[in-house]
Image (spheres, helix red, strand yellow):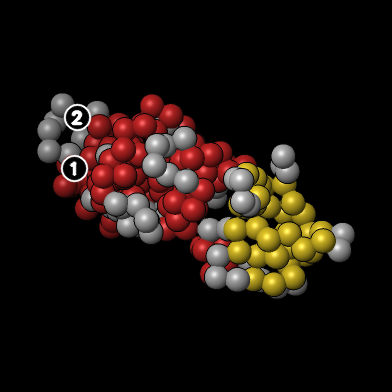
């Protein structure tokens, strides 16, 4: 098992990079979002890898962070999703976005991934929902560098304390103040809802 691969990108393809590591060119399949934004020929990189072994092939899949790799492996445990399907999910949304989509029961957002239909998305939510917790999802998102948007003005318009907390949490996750306020106002339909319930409901309006 190869835990990670470090070297220089020799070339890039539509869904892979070739990494030169001590004169050996390793083909590593990566989320297309990385190719679009962050991986260029000549760059020195370190990718955390998963090795998929079949009778006719040995394939490496690579990610910038251990968190992305862990989420990729969780996806592999969902019945009906193989390495290509899991890579497609993480090409269409970040690991953070996937966690929130699962917690918000947002099958439509997950079904946008190539090769993932609505039924598979619903199965994914069912099988992964107990793997994620809302508080941990927020902590991971914040740890990944999301910054608060100063445009938010919690407390305006007579919102409840729970709604204020929900707005602050969404802003801390990187949503604009206007987006956060609009989503919370749509979601907070019951005064008895606590901040966690409002957050779960509000996230459905943000995907």
As helix, strand or loop, the secondary structure at mark 1 comes to: helix
Numbered-mark total: 2
Mark 1 or 2, nearer chain start: 1
Task: Quadrant for the N terminus, please.
Answer: top right
Measuring 53% from the left and 39% from the top, which residue is drawn there? Answer: 73
Image side of residue 186 versus residue 111, left or right: left
Question: Residue 141, image x and y in percent?
Answer: 48, 44
Measuring 54% from the left and 50% from the top, which residue is drawn there? Answer: 145
Question: Residue 207, image x and y in percent?
Answer: 30, 53
Question: Residue 119, image x and y in percent?
Answer: 26, 44
The residue positioned farthest toward the front in the image shown: 55
Q: From what the image shows, is residue 186 above or below residue 139?
A: below
Check whether the beta carbons of the residues at disc 1 and disc 2 lie within 8 A of each other.
yes
Which disc number belongs to residue 193? 2
Image side of residue 123 versus residue 136, left or right: left
Which disc number belongs to residue 96? none
Mark 1, residue position: 187
Q: Nearer the viewer, residue 140 or 114?
A: 114
As helix, strand or loop, the secondary structure at mark 2 comes to: loop
Q: From what the image shows, is residue 82 above or below residue 13?
A: above
- State how far apart marks 1 and 2 are (Cα): 9 Å
């Amino acid at each position: 098992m190869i835990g990670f691969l470090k070297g220089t990108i020799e070339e890039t393809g539509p869904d892979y990079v070739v990494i030169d590591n001590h004169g050996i060119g390793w083909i590593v399949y990566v989320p297309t979002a990385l190719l679009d934004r962050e991986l260029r020929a000549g760059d020195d990189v370190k990718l955390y890898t998963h090795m998929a072994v079949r009778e006719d092939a040995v394939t490496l899949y690579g990610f910038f962070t251990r968190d992305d790799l862990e989420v990729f492996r969780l996806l592999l445990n969902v019945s009906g999703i193989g390495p290509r399907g899991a890579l497609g999910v993480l090409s269409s949304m970040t690991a953070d976005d996937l966690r929130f989509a699962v917690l918000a029961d947002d099958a439509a957002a997950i079904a946008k991934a190539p090769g993932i239909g609505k039924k598979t998305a619903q199965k994914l939510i069912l099988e992964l929902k107990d793997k994620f917790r809302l508080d941990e999802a927020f902590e991971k998102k914040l740890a990944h560098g999301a910054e608060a948007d100063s445009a938010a003005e919690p407390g305006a318009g007579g919102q409840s304390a729970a709604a204020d907390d929900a707005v602050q949490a969404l802003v801390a996750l990187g949503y604009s103040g206007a987006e956060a306020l609009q989503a919370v106002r749509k979601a907070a339909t019951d005064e008895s809802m606590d901040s966690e319930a409002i957050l779960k409901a509000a996230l459905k309006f943000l995907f």
